[in-house]
Amino acid sequence: MIFRIFATTLFIVIIVGSIWLGGQQREAAAPATVASTSTDLGYSARRAVLIETGPDGLPLYTVNAEVIRERSTNDVEFEQVQMSFRDQGGQIWKARADRGELGQQTGKVELTGDVHVDGLLPGSPEAADLSTQKLFVDRRADLISTDESVTLNWGGRQLTSHGMIAALTQRRLLLESGVHGIFSPP
C-alpha cells in the first residue's frame, strides 16, 4: 500500500513539475523580430506574363518576361522583356528589350537595353521598326518617348534623331533634335 501511495505521489509531482517548468520556459523565451530592409522582394517569377486590361476587357498591354521581380517600392522589374500594346485605333505594337521596369502607381513602362518597337505607322501599309537604348511607354497618356538616340526604319526609309515623342492618340511622331534621314527610291 505504501508503494501505491508513493507511486501516485511521484506521478503527481512529475506532472506538476512539468507544467511548472514548461510555463517558465515559455515566459523566458524572447520573441524573435525580423528586420525588413529596403531590398526585400515582393514576388518573383520566371517566364511570367503580366496583363493589364481596359474597361472593355481587352488587354491594354501584355508583358512577357523571362524574370519578373516586385521590389519593396511596388515597382516591377523585368528581364528579357517582350511587350505588346494597342493604341486607340486598335493597332497592335510589339516591343522587346533586355530589361524593363513598371511603376505600378504610374502605369509607365521603362524599357532599356536594345529596345525595338514594331508596328504599322498610321497611313502606312508597311511595318516600322523603332530602335533605341531606352524607351518609356505611358499607356495612360498613350505616349512613347525617349531622350536617347533613336532610329526609325520603315519601307526603305531610315530616320535618326536624338529624342522622340510618339503621341499614339493623336497619330503624331515628333523627332526632337539632330534629325537625319535616308529615303531610298521604290
Image: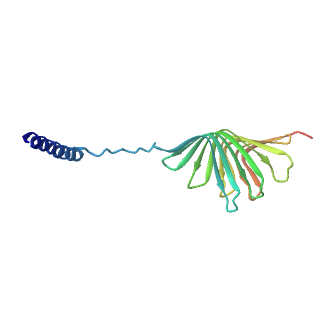
Q: Residue at x 37, y 44 (%)?
A: 35
Q: With respect to residue 60, does 153 lie above or below?
A: above
The total of numbered circles placed on residues is 0
Q: Give the position of the N terminus as an image quadrant.
A: top left
- Among the 4 quarters of the image, the one containing residue 143: bottom right
Q: Give the position of the C terminus as an image quadrant.
A: top right
Compare residues 143 and 12 and report the one nearer the observer.
12
Q: How is the image coloured?
A: rainbow
Q: Residue at x 73, y 45 (%)?
A: 94
Q: Residue at x 68, y 51 (%)?
A: 61
Compare residues 136 and 157 and report the one nearer the observer.
136
**Which residue is outermost to the bottom?**
55
**Residue 135 spot, x, y in % from top left:** 66, 45
**Residue 116 spot, x, y in % from top left:** 72, 41
**Which residue is outermost to the left?**
2
- Among the 4 quarters of the image, the one containing residue 180: top right
**Residue 60 spot, x, y in % from top left:** 69, 55
**Which residue is outermost to the front?**
1
- Among the 4 quarters of the image, the one containing residue 13: top left
**Residue 144 spot, x, y in % from top left:** 69, 50
